[in-house]
């Protein structure tokens, strides 16, 4: 096993006031990177389950899934890694199993995409169980019960992984959608967002046979990512340049009738979003860094911390406990500690339809 120090962990905010004074949250950044003598990392996504952290490493010609252990205190430990057949694009994790989407890029054209399932029963010895080839770009994966929902060239592919050594493509789902680009699940309800501002909903109580419930346009802009917490869905939207990217909050308590609550400008070209409790974290994509919002009043989100812009791209992120994990490309994995901050500043939001 290889021991890797976290430099200093970041202090930012999670908290509940919504005043108009300016936030004064410290931002001391800690970074995970392989130590000297180990191949460099190009972290594009991260997933967390318990004390295990899975990093999708898209290093050109040497893409890997890297498995880390995150103790409550002290150093991160890299337990093991396993090579992938293409450049990693996303990762999801559940106890004992990781799923990584990947694609080979040839002159900006995606070829030889796929889904690889990895046994993490023994995290220090991750082992490939299977690879399911999928033509074209494979841009995302989400595990749910016995299936993997895979974003593949604009389709949402449902893959039966009840037998991880032999995954089977069951169907492709794109009702009324222009190009599926993001997916999330809450309970038995699946939400798929497209590059035309539309949110489609399906009942996945039987995951291999989704029942389409309807679609609603929640914005006129491309939807790039989404996450859910309870009855709240958060998405990031990409307007036409030079307009800033946006955080879009949607009430999904009645899933077939999602209702947009607010739209708030982000500090950069948003790439991904994670929501836990009253906190939303947005990675700032090619601008680098992360931005935090207090969602105590989802009609008027309040920015409560921002770290960035930075020199490197920010990609996928995850929140577990009081830590935020941000994939920072060749800068590795940024680790933040989420601490209370009592003086958030007002957001620049608009609300309702």
Image (spheres, rainbow, N blue to C red):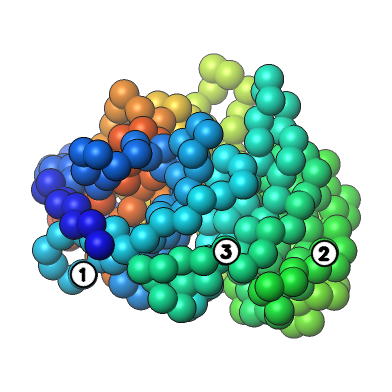
**Residue behind mark 2:** 169
Name the residue at 59% across, 33% down.
Answer: 238
**Residue behind mark 1:** 71
Name the residue at 31% across, 63% down.
Answer: 79
Name the residue at 31% across, 72% down.
Answer: 51
Instruction: Between residue 242 and residue 298, name the one nearer to us.
Output: 242
The numbered disc on residue 128 is 3
- Distance (Cα) linking label 1 and label 3: 25 Å
Q: What is the x, y in percent for residue 340?
A: 17, 60
Instruction: Between residue 123 and residue 29, name the one nearer to us.
Output: 123
Name the residue at 61% across, 29% down.
Answer: 239
Which one is earlier in the sequence, the residue at label 2 or at label 1? 1
Disc 3 crowd, CA 10 A, few/some/many (<14, 14-19, 20+): some
Would you say residue 265 is visible in this rendering?
no
Left of 81 or right of it: where is 10? Answer: left
Q: What is the x, y in percent for residue 291?
A: 34, 42
- Image quadrant containing the N terminus: bottom left
Q: What is the x, y in percent for residue 165?
A: 68, 73
Instruction: Between residue 214 and residue 44, name the one nearer to us.
Output: 44
Instruction: Between residue 64 and residue 187, name the one nearer to us.
Output: 64
Left of 17 or right of it: where is 289? Answer: right
Examine the rendered structure and indicate whether residue 286 appears above or below residue 159: above
Disc 1 crowd, CA 10 A, few/some/many (<14, 14-19, 20+): few
Would you say residue 118 is visible in this rendering?
yes
């Amino acid at each position: 096993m290889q021991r890797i120090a976290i430099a200093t962990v970041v202090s930012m905010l999670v908290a509940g006031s919504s005043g108009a004074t300016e936030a004064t949250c410290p931002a001391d950044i800690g970074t995970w990177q392989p130590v000297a003598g180990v191949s460099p990392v190009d972290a594009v996504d991260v997933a967390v389950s318990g004390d295990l952290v899975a990093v999708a490493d898209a290093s050109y010609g040497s893409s890997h899934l890297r498995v880390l252990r995150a103790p409550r205190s002290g150093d991160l430990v890299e337990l093991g890694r396993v090579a992938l057949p293409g450049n990693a694009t996303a990762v999801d994790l559940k106890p004992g199993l990781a799923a990584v989407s990947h694609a080979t890029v040839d002159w900006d054209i995606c070829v030889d995409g796929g889904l690889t399932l990895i046994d993490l029963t023994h995290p220090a010895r991750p082992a490939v169980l299977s690879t399911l080839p999928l033509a074209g770009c494979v841009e995302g994966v989400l595990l749910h019960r016995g299936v993997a929902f895979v974003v593949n060239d604009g389709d949402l592919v449902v893959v039966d992984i009840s037998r991880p050594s032999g995954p089977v493509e069951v169907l492709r789902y794109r009702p009324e959608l222009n190009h599926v680009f993001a997916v999330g699940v809450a309970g038995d309800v699946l939400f798929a967002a497209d590059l035309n501002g539309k949110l489609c909903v399906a009942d996945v109580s039987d995951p291999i046979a989704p029942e389409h419930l309807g679609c609603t346009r929640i914005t006129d802009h491309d939807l790039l990512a989404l996450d859910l917490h309870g009855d709240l869905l958060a998405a990031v939207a990409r307007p036409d340049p030079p307009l800033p990217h946006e955080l879009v909050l949607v009430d999904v308590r009645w899933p077939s009738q999602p209702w947009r609550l607010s739209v708030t400008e982000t500090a950069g070209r948003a790439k991904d979003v994670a929501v836990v409790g009253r906190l939303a974290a947005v990675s700032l994509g090619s601008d680098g860094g992360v931005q935090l919002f207090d969602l105590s009043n989802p009609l008027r989100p309040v920015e409560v911390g921002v770290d960035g812009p930075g020199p490197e791209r920010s990609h996928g992120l995850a929140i577990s406990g009081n830590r935020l994990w941000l994939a920072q490309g060749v800068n590795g994995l940024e680790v933040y500690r989420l601490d209370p901050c009592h003086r958030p500043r007002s957001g620049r939001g608009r609300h309702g339809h």
